[in-house]
Image (spheres, rainbow, N blue to C red):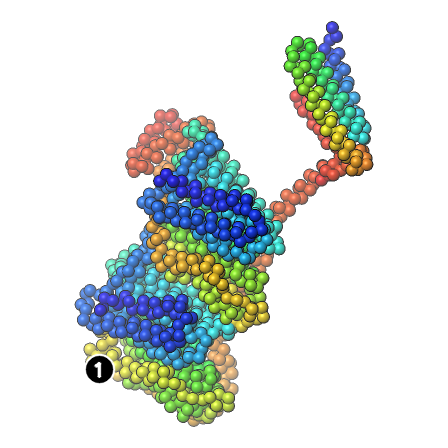
Amino acid sequence: MNFPVLSVVTFLPLAGAILLVFLPAEKKNLLRYVAFAFALVTFAVSLALYFNFDATTPQPQFEEKSAWLGYGINYHLGLDGISLYLVLLTTFLLPIVLLSSWTYIEKRVKEYLVFMLLLETGIIGVFVSLNLFLFYVFWEAMLIPMYFLIGVWGGPRRIYATLKFVLMTMFGSLLMLVAIFVLYAYYYKATGIYSFNIFDHYQLILNPGVQAWLFLAFALAFAIKVPMFPFHTWLPDAHVEAPTAGSVILAAVLLKMGTYGFLRFALPLFPDATERFLPLLAVLSLVGIIYGGLMALIQKDVKSLVAYSSVSHMGLIMLAVFALNVEGVQGAIYQMINHGLSTGALFLIVGILYERAHTRLIKDFGGVSSQMPVFAAFFLVCVLSSVGLPGLNGFVGEVLCLFGVFRVSTLMAILAVTTVILAAAYLLWMYQRVMHGPVKNEKVRTFKDMNLREIAYLAPIVILMFWMGIYPETFLRKMDSSVVHLLNRVKNRQRVFVQEAGTAREKLAIVKRVETGTQESMAEGTAIKNAVMEEAVIAGHREEKKKELEAVDKERGGNPDD
Amino acid sequence: MTESFWLIPFIPGASAFVLAVFGRWLPKKWVSLQACLSVFASFVLSVVAWVGLLKVDRETLPLVKTLFTWIASGSFSANLSFQLDPLSCVMALVVTGVGFLIHVYSVGYMGHDKGYTRYFAYLNLFTFAMLILVMASNIVLMFVGWEGVGLCSYLLIGFWFEKHSAASAGKKAFIVNRIGDAAFILGIFFLIVHAGSGEFRVINEAVHGGHIGAGLVTLIAILLFIGATGKSAQIPLYVWLPDAMEGPTPVSALIHAATMVTAGVYMVSRMNVLYTLSGEAAQIVAVVGALTAVYAATMALTQNDIKRVLAYSTISQIGYMFIGCGVGAYAAGMFHLYTHAFFKSLLFLAAGSVMHALSGELDMRKMGGLRKYLPLTYPTFLIGAIAIAGVPFLSGFFSKDAILTQAFAQGRYFVWALGIMGAVLTAFYMFRLIFLTFHGEERIEPEAKRHLHESPRVMTVPLVVLAFFSVVAGYVGLPVVFGKKANLFNRFLEPVLDPAHEIHLSLGTEWTLILVSVAVAVCGIYVAYVFYLKSPQMPHNLVRRFPGVYKLLYNKYYVDEVYDAVFVSPTVKGSEAVYTRFDLRVIDGTIDGTAKATGLAGRVLSLFQSGLVKDYALAMLLGVVIFLGYLLF
Amino acid sequence: MIPVSYFFGLSLILFALGIIAFFIKRDLITMFMAVEVMLNAANLAFISLAKASGSLSGQVIVFFIITVAAAEAAIGLAIILLVFRQRKTIKTEEFRLMKG
């Protein structure tokens, strides 16, 4: 396909933002319609991605590549089964959040819409970049609109919240930038080619010591974004202060950038380091699941409750990713979408309540159900989706995640399964206090049920929840080959150092030689090993190639044992 | 027609969908008609399926209908597929049959409620979920129904959500059930990993073929049983069921007596290969069942709330079913499930009728002498009570006796003794209920008395039908003393529930056991008669003699309080402490501290910025001098 | 022919005087003049070396510096004038706006 559909999806919102700049700021409704139209068209175009997606290949599709700044900095976009749904989720949610803030945002409407559209471009860019440099540009660019969205349209403590959010994210991503350049340098040394291409870097075999440092730098950036315990505290603050639309986007897609980062970069780039730090990360995820759940239990503000529930849910997603098996990773990707829908919907719902009551404290509500029956139904479906009730989307993701974890470690699964109980406890308790019981606050009696606009933007989410819960095949099958490919990549590469090396003595020898050797010989060694192993992986004759590898070692005069 | 059995769940499901989405625009008559007819249609289909099953060759069982692959990823896969075999057929018949009668009853009972449509939407949804549970051909889909009925139970208990207690009870039910479900999920995972699939046929083959180690089988069986203790309200997770009585009475009859709470028994019977193989797990099932049977019965002794007595009675009766499963007499357990569905829903509906007559009064202390005011409710209630008490020739007698006989035959004398003890208590509290409500002096509030009336026909007809079945339902499962082939029920279930390991006693022993059961029931009824009709001061004297025991029973052994103090409140308080001390102070403190330290460093360094141009020039000069000096020397 | 070192000596003396004047004077105008003296000291060094080595580039640079200095003097004086208008003083101690 020659039509640059990915570029269109990525930059159509940007075009909309530019157009908005030239429209008069007073005509608020015109601005809203224009922005909404752009978001809608972007979604429509992105649907083409889904329908034309070839599920049989793990290779990136709709690939676009052209030179940009030189030195390996290329404009390189592509989509595979992992990023497909994240892009779709983003384009799906943007019209919805624009609708949700139709009347709520009255101040600086033009700037608001411009930032929303810019944000969309930034997020999609992150998911489709296949060039590390380009990825980093989008990763950082996305922060700017978010910074303003919280900082300008947020609640009373918005400055504190937005600074905390941006500074924490920046702190992580700066280390990642350094790591990207180190990686770049290693690649250049090994091959003599400048490249930021992620697929080139997948080929690179680094010694585990280097991998460890680079992995930690990447992992920190992503862990803050996810957020994993103990880097989660920016999330409740940012959510509580952000406007509804900001919260929705933040929870639904921004957090996924962290998990996506692990899947796309940290794990396949540094398989040995992954193996080394897996226990630590898994434990942190596990702590996040339980900790987030317990914290959610006692929050007084509905939004921070949902924020902590995100910590818990994201913990499960991360744990499933670290299970490194098909069920776990597929479940994690599925759960990312689920979490985007259910948590996004919950934030929209809190927004609807907030527009009526101008408070989000649980104790100010009670008995809302009798005033707003339609709303109660929507709210309940979203809560149940988040709880993971079978028949709704949450269950499919959750059960796959837990199963993936279970296959790796029974103990971890037993601990992780507490999320089933905790999620029911905190969400239903909240639902009861907000929606049920007698009306305590007289203001509640004045609440009007949802209007058509509100139904219009929640209904698609709810329909999708049912769809994803009842017929997940639509979604699961398109990610199969990408997930399998990703796992093979991580696992086969691990074997180069860990399993293929055979005995512990040999393993140690390889590590030692690479570490004590000069830079040149190391790069050389890596390149040779790289070439041999790639061939081996492709041909499937690992044993033979291993012998060849040993022969090469001998030729180079190095006795692996000294 | 038999092949269309997979439609059975979907008819009420479709009806629930229509009511939930379009219900607000439908007239009330239409709503009632649609809700009842959809369940009736399922019932008809179930009967057709049953007739079909009688003809079908046993070797071809179960009939499986796969609609589509539901979840598939790696080694995890689950189909949306249904199966028909005698076990699921019995359950489907009970669910749709009793369910239909309760739907009809609800038309009258809920007639004036403003949430009428919502009620029937939930009730249909429940029927849908329950039918999925019993007809699923794999354990993952069964779990869907399992959770689905839990959801409906949550919705229906909290149906009158404006009432704080109702909303709380609903939530409690859901969360307690979820504790069991967490274990259930783990059980499912073990099964899928080790049996290779969640399909019941595959699991059965894997277990029979010895592909799963004995220790693992025990572990799986126990995990699944923990799930069952949640759903079927057994020790230690029974606490939600008494509170669940906050829901409308027909709901208590359908969900919390006849169908949903017995799902655990169905599940254990469905997985009977596991429990047959693992003696330890079966032992646990039997002992937990027996303990619950007695324990719940003791709590029923002192309650004054008519529905709570019935709730504890339900817990106790399900205990009996588990005894049956635990001693290997799955068919007997299922038989009790089947008879219990009739007489317990009858009792609930009759209690609902009493409440209806007394404008919602639940307290037995404010009843008495109602016999003459409720000419239809009284006899039906009485039939239910006689049936549950184990008086001969009514359904409860046959089923309870079948369980206890098997317990005795298997040499589980301890379990058997507990069962007998429970039987005395059952007879006693049921007749305490009868005497306090329908006999003796009138203690009715004057306001309620003015509206006192028998219920409309739409409510009494289901009562009569259920009463009829409470009497005759037992005759399909006659004990061995009436002939080896007398137990039609067991024979029907044979393809699923292998009776090979049931032990048959000599006729003499059988007769002795039957006589013991009868004596026990009569004894319980007589004591109740003495206590509450002949000399009503006696219970008071007893209470005065043993105030401690009475208080303990009256307060339900303080289990709710203990759970709250041990689990709930430490979790909440601990979380609060962690939140303020750790989350806000340590983690956030570190982050804010880093920010503050950076700011502080900046402020310290900014002291060098004097703002005087000459200071800067001097610094520059010094710099140049040092630089030059470095270059030159 | 006067040896280059003499010019260098003079340039150094001028430069030192400039520095001293810059630090001991308090009004902007004088300090500005001190800077100009230093500039011209540098110019002197350039031109003498250019003469001695016979290269033109040194002279070019001097022209360049003179041009820049002229522009700088114009702007600098204008700034000082504006400062004076606003603050009614040109004493450097009075200005500490950049204090941290």
Please provide percent x and percent y for residue B371: 40, 91
Closest to the observer: A377 or B182? A377
Please provide percent x and percent y for residue A110: 56, 49
Q: Mark 1 lies on which chain?
A: B
Q: Is residue B456 left or right of residue B555?
A: left
Please provide percent x and percent y for residue A525: 40, 30
Judge whether A148 appears above or below B538 on screen: above
In the image, farthest residue toward the top = C1
| Residue A141 shows in the view | yes
Q: In this view, does A30 lie to the left or right of A323?
A: right
Residue B26 lies in what quarter of the image?
A: bottom left
Please provide percent x and percent y for residue A411: 42, 55
Judge whether A306 appears above or below B336 on screen: above
Closest to the observer: C5 or B297? C5
Residue position marked by numbered label 1 in the rendering: B482
Name the residue rendered at 46%, 28% in the picture. Answer: A518
Judge whether A40 appears above or below B294 on screen: above
Closest to the observer: A207 or B84? B84
Name the residue rendered at 71%, 26% in the picture. Answer: C72
| Residue A492 shows in the view | no
